[in-house]
Image (spheres, rainbow, N blue to C red):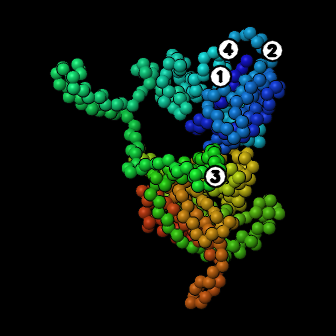
Amino acid sequence: MFEFLLPDLGEGIHEGEILRWHVAIGDSIEEDEPLVDVETDKAAVTIPSPKSGRVTALTGKPGEVVHTGEVICSIEVSGESHEAAPETVEVETAALVSTEAGVGAPPFSPQRGERSPIPAAPATRRIARELGVELAAVPPSGHARRVTTEDVRAFAAGGAAAQPSRPAPAPRQGDPAAAGPAVRAEPAAPPASATPTISSIPFLEINPLPDYSEEGPVERIPFRSIRRKVARKMVTSMILAPHVAHMDEADVTELEALRLSQRDRYQDRDGVRLNLMSFVMRAVARGLQDWPELNASLDPVREELILKRYVNLGFAADTERGLVVPVIRDAHHKSVLALAKDTATLAAEARDGSIQASSLRGGTFTITNIGPLGGTALVPTINYPEVAILGMARVSEKPVVRDGAIVIRKILPMTLAFDHRVADGAQAARFMTTLIRRLEDPASLLIET
């Protein structure tokens, strides 16, 4: 009997929510055929079957969460004797394909015997073999009692995994240990290579919620997958990054006239609809090359500012499963038309669940646009560890003064939220001024390279 463990899904992901089983108990399945769809904090993935045979057991129903290293399926392998002793098999994990996009290579699938499996990534198991360490003997420090590479190295170096140091309790009166000579305990100096840790937040205390069911009917909905990932990122961003918001407006009357005059032409020829977002992306990508501190990340441990000499633009996409941020790579090298194509493709993949995990990471700056949904202004939350985000509201016609006369113009409200540790208000104002200049002069926007 082959017992299939939920494989290592990579990128620090230790659990997933079951979306759909492709088989039922008693079904026959071939190796590499779709077995189960699992949604993680990053994206939905289809896990293929590592063996051919008959399914004898399934663990978890749609909507339930399973953890890496847990048995999720038992398969009676074709041609295997029931009395045969189970063998341990290790297959290196391969990239998993997003839901509905197809089936990837067989993931890591150790087959267990009588002993419970030890949750660990393939790389960790490889290090353990090289160092001659038995995983079962290593105290785990990872999530869900997962053995990490650091655990294995610490065990190999000192015979036990590293544990947080605790002060020894002082001997009590009458304790024999107190009868000896007084010895003053000096705190051990941390090793030079010790990594500094982030301190706790003063005065932060989270209390349990009251029982709202005492007041009336309630419904409890599991807070999981992408929605939970968004919540974690937003809390991290708001706690770590001191947000400042700079608000301004751009007169996009000429830009909208240009866009509308070319929209049908390119939609008929290339099947791409030019939208305002693609022009803003072009202007932002150019502006980030002028102001690289807004295209950066701050390393709070090493106390270094990482300036990225490339521009990967993320954009917020509203999907049925929650907010996701697809990333357009090397946006500073792309035309308005190319940006429009990439935006349409990635947004469609995000909505139907086929987007690759690689398309959701690596962003350097994010743009969010609530304009199609309405709203006169917004204050967006920085997509940490980025240091800035641009929010676009609805374009509307407003009376403005031009050359002493009141005229009606199309106005785009925008907000730049930025990390005040990295940039000051003057830098943000200069960035927005150059951004507005490019949007108000679309000819220069298209000519600049």
Q: Residues within 10 Å of mark 4 (few under 14, many from 20)?
A: few
**C-alpha span from label 3 to label 2:** 52 Å
Residue appearing at x 83%, y 63% in the figure? 268
**C-alpha span from label 3 to label 4:** 49 Å
The three-letter amino acid code for the residue at tag 2 is Gly
| Residue 163 visible in the shown view | yes
Q: Are marks 1 and 4 in contact (CB under 8 Å)?
A: no
The three-letter amino acid code for the residue at tag 3 is Val
Question: Which element type, helix, strand or loop, lies under badge 4?
Answer: loop
Tag 2 residue: 79
Which mark sits nearer the N-terminus, 2 or 1?
Answer: 2
Tag 1 residue: 110
Q: Which mark is residue 87?
A: 4
Foreground: disc 3 or disc 4: 3
Q: Residues within 10 Å of mark 1 (few under 14, many from 20)?
A: many
Residue appearing at x 49%, y 22% in the figure? 138
